[in-house]
Image (tube, rainbow, N blue to C red):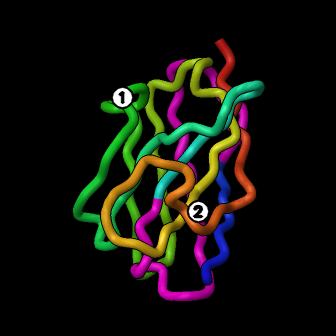
Amino acid sequence: QVQLVESGGGLVQAGDSLRLSCAASGRTFSSYTMAWFRQAPGKEREFVACISRSGSSTYYADSVKGRFTISRDNAKNTLYLQKNSLNPEDTAVYYCAAKNTAGLGKVRSEYDYWGQGTQVTVSS
């Protein structure tokens, strides 16, 4: 199995940029499809972006397409989420997740392992 630890959250202003990281340990990182989800107060956890095992394929939620970029460094066992043009609606706890199966996926139940989350707050 794999252990996931997110970092990089914080308080920023609208229009700012932020990069989240997710450090993985345990089983070989490159064997997992990875994703970011987020959960705003009072709302369900929602899909943000995912990336294939090699990093060659990505998929984004419409709400973040063009503003967020998911990437991974398999040599460093780390997943990233570059977030630009942040707005208050991006305020949430952000979680990284890993799944054993190949293929991109946006459904929460597909993912086997989760980090503890990192808070991102965007002020207007």
78 to 17, vertically: above or below: below
Residue 22's disc is 2
Q: Residue at x 62, y 68 (%)?
A: 113
Amino acid type shown at disc 1: Asp
| Residue 59 image point, x, y percent | 31, 47
Q: Residue at x 29, y 52 (%)?
A: 58
Residue 56 occupies quadrant:
bottom left
Q: Which residues are magenta?
A: 9-34
Mark 1 Cα shell of 10 Å, populated few (<14), some (14-19), many (≥20): few
In primary-sequence order, the first of circles 1 and 2 is: 2
Q: Secondary structure at mark 1?
A: loop
Q: CA distance from mark 1 to mark 2?
A: 22 Å
Disc 1 + disc 2, Cβ < 8 Å = no
47 to 32, vertically: above or below: above
- Residue most toward the bottom? 27
Amino acid type shown at disc 2: Cys
Please state, as top left, top right, bottom left or bottom right, where the N terminus lies in the image: bottom right
* Magenta stretch contains residue 11: yes
| Residue 17 image point, x, y percent | 51, 34
**Residue 66 as seen in the image, left or right of residue 7:** left
Mark 2 Cα shell of 10 Å, populated few (<14), some (14-19), many (≥20): many
Q: Residue at x 68, y 61 (%)?
A: 115
106 to 42, vertically: above or below: below
* Magenta stretch contains residue 69: no
- Residue most toward the top? 124
| Residue 86 image point, x, y percent | 52, 25
**Discs 1/2, front:** 1
Residue position marked by numbered label 1 in the rendering: 62
**Residue 19 as seen in the image, left or right of residue 119:** left
